[in-house]
Image (spheres, rainbow, N blue to C red):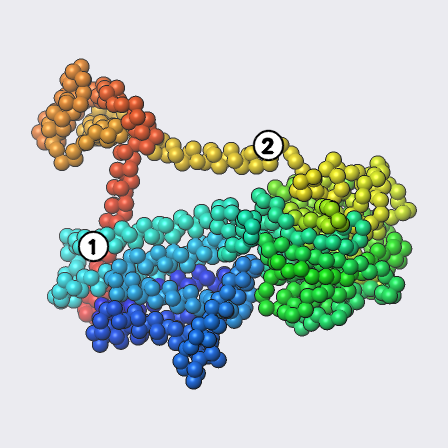
Amino acid sequence: MTGHARISLAAWGATVLGSLVLTPVFSGPFLFISAFLCAIVTGVGVLLQNLRAPRVVVPVVQLIVLVELISLFFLKETMKFGLVPTGATAIEFNSQLVSAMSSINQYSAPLPPDDNLLLFATTVISATGLLIHVIAVQIRQAAWAGLLLLIMYTVPAATVHGGLPALLFIPPAIGYIVLLSAEGRSRLSRWGRRISGVSHLDAAEPVEASALGQAGRRIGLSVVALAAILPALLPTLPEGVIGNGLGGGGTGGTGLGASISTTDPMLDMGKNLKRPKNDVALTYKGGPSGGTYLRLTSLDQFDGNTWRISDRKNRGRKIEDELVPPPGFTGDLARVQKVKMEIDVNKVFRSQFAPIPYPAQSISLRRNWQYDASSLDVSSTDGAVVSGKKYNVTAYDLRPTEEQLRDAISRGAPDEISSRLPRSVPPRITDLTRQITADANGNKYLMAVALQKWFRTEGGYTYSTTNQRGSGMKAIEDFLLENKTGYCEQFATGMALMARIAGIPSRVGIGFLPGQAGANGQYTVRMHDMHAWPELYFESVGWVRFEPTPASRVASTPEWTIPSSNPTSPTTAPTTAPTTPGQTEDPGIEKPENGRNLNDDNGAAAFDSGNWFTNGGARTLGIAAIVVLVLLIPWILRSLNRRRRYSRAPSRVAAEGLWSEVRDTSRDLGLDWNDVSTPRQTGEWLVTKLPDEAHPSALRLARSVEAMRYAGQADVATDLRPDVTVIRKALWKQAPARRRWRARLLPASWRWYLSRGTTEASDLLDEFDLLLARLRSTILRRRHAN
């Protein structure tokens, strides 16, 4: 096999192995299609090189073949005669890429199966494969191709929630090593034909590679180290550094946009609540007096790890004049009061779901929008987002009475999901649920009221967004039984889980609190107004909202959750503050200092203020300490090395160490120490840099080292440490203050050791090359012997 063919195949293999890291991001057969397209492009390149085509022509032809193949696979309808790409092909290609980027901006990884995303992933991998082939084969710089593999690895490492498995780094590394090996073997083959196969590589002397080969290995070592370190650092960077997902957004200087995905809405809500800037998400007019909750979607499937949206196949319905009646409600809707609203969504908020009150009767969104018959949330059908849209909504102002909820007879769950419990429910949570609901005597409504009261007042829970553990089973157990600190995610999912344990179907709603009232009846809803709450199902009434989040975040609870027969509800101090929309005055909740619900005068969410240390101060101090520690690493290593040298008893090794200490001190202070000079020459040079009183120490040290190295007659028991101390102090005293500070903070000798370390690491790669050759020689020798 020719050298260029070997490198071409290795480049194809490196591309395929490197693209494996994208499997946590994209779905569908993108990997197989990309591998096939890259194989065709690689084959074309090998064929043209065998035909001795000009080097410039090969990548051009490969690019033409790649464009043709992508067009045939994904854009055949736009091609002339079904074979020739046209302007329409380019326009459609651009349109699909724009749609793919829109989907990437709104979804969390893994992205859902979609033709646009399949085209995007295939194009990226195929184009990367072509570039790797050009760099490795045409430009003959295979080491630099590792940067492209690094880029493919850092994308999922920076965007996949929870990071990538460590083992996923192995395939790209293997592909890169194979590519380097193929390039190295091809380079060795240019030296001439080897005699008797590879047996002569088994010589004792090391094989000196060319300077270019050594440089390639150094570049390769740097790329591999970068690929291992950079992805580990990227997921820890703040959201504003790399963006929210893969795309930016936002207008008017508002910065990166916020998104809610269909994959993990709860995760996205948590990110939006912790965004440093409290952007306006939307404004609305109309609706019930006092504002209203706006819901995006509901999470009804809990597998013990994550609350997610259940499979909605065959449940989406086209929006026509009216939506279906509220699921579970059996009353006369004609007698239910209706409210009309006008909602204007800011461009900074990207969501496939439209924020609307529950339950909606009608909505003006029509084209490319649908609603789910069981949850009544409204979503787009083509990956479009609701940002920048303005629409009208008519909703039912349902206010179930206490009697209706008390008398609701449970005939089972409305579906197969909302009552399902994971197998991993800890017995302690079950016992706690039974303890809280014991006085309800089996009444589902009183059980729900008892749970809500437990979370808001009796359980000793504290609202804080510092909880980073999420809403998996272990996180809920820790929240319920141990630290009792969390935000709406933990309160909503904790109550929803306990409701299911109590036999009440439940799900978790995701959306917005009513926001801040303004002039002309307009309400402003910001990103920090995002909220989660449990929805519990009662026969003949349907899904009913409860509010377990404490008063420090949400001032009042729905009026139907306060039993009239039990006046000792959440508190005994009545309040005359306005209540959350659709509610009456609540005598059972104390009014927080920041006023109704959550907003202060600036429209920011009213969180548990705490103090400077708890509100980011501790994290700031920790980051500052880490930065200082990193900056002090050179000084720490230099100090430890100096202490080690001084700690040795007089000997030849100790003398060499002290000589090295003088060398490093000279370099730290900017003096030009010459490594190739003899000790005598260096001693004479050192005398010129020292005051007269230090000359004897310098000469004595130089002659002692010279005698130990060359004569073997020196007294190894001579303690040279006092002489070295005199020399060091004299050098420091002679140096300018600027050089002394630089020597402390960033000693030049430390950089020299770092450079030496990379050189030795690249030498190890040379030894690795030789080891592989020896192993191959041994295997061939044994095969011939047999």
Q: Name the residue under label 1.
A: 212
- Which-is-in-front pick, marks 2 and 1? 2
State left or right for residue 557 relative to residue 150: right
| Residue 508 visible at all | no
Where residue 776 sits, quadrant-wise, is bottom left
Q: Distance between the residues labelled 2 and 1?
A: 56 Å
Q: Is mark 2 on a helix, strand or loop?
A: loop
- Mark 2–mark 1 CB contact (< 8 Å): no
Residue visible at 59% across and 49% down? 271
Residue most extreme to the front: 520
Residue visible at 62% across and 32% down? 611
Dot 1 alpha-carbon crowd within 10 angstroms: few under 14, some 14 to 19, many 20 or more: few
Looking at the picture, how far across and down is residue 368, in whole percent?
Answer: 63, 69
Residue most extreme to the bottom: 81
Amino acid type shown at disc 2: Trp
Residue visible at 43% across and 63% down? 20
State left or right for residue 781 relative to residue 61: left
State left or right for residue 171 relative to residue 496: left
Image quarter of the C terminus: bottom left
Dot 2 alpha-carbon crowd within 10 angstroms: few under 14, some 14 to 19, many 20 or more: few
State left or right for residue 275 relative to residue 531: left
Looking at the picture, how far across and down is residue 628, in whole percent?
Answer: 43, 33
Amino acid type shown at disc 1: Leu
Looking at the picture, how far across and down is residue 593, in whole percent?
Answer: 74, 35
Image quarter of the N terminus: bottom left
| Residue 158 visible at all | yes
Q: Is mark 1 on a helix, strand or loop?
A: helix
Q: In this view, does 187 lie above or below 624?
A: below
| Mark 2 or mark 1, earlier in chain | 1
Question: In terms of depth relative to the viewer, which is nearer, 144 or 385?
Answer: 385
Where residue 79 sits, quadrant-wise, is bottom left
Q: Mark 2 points at which residue?
A: 612
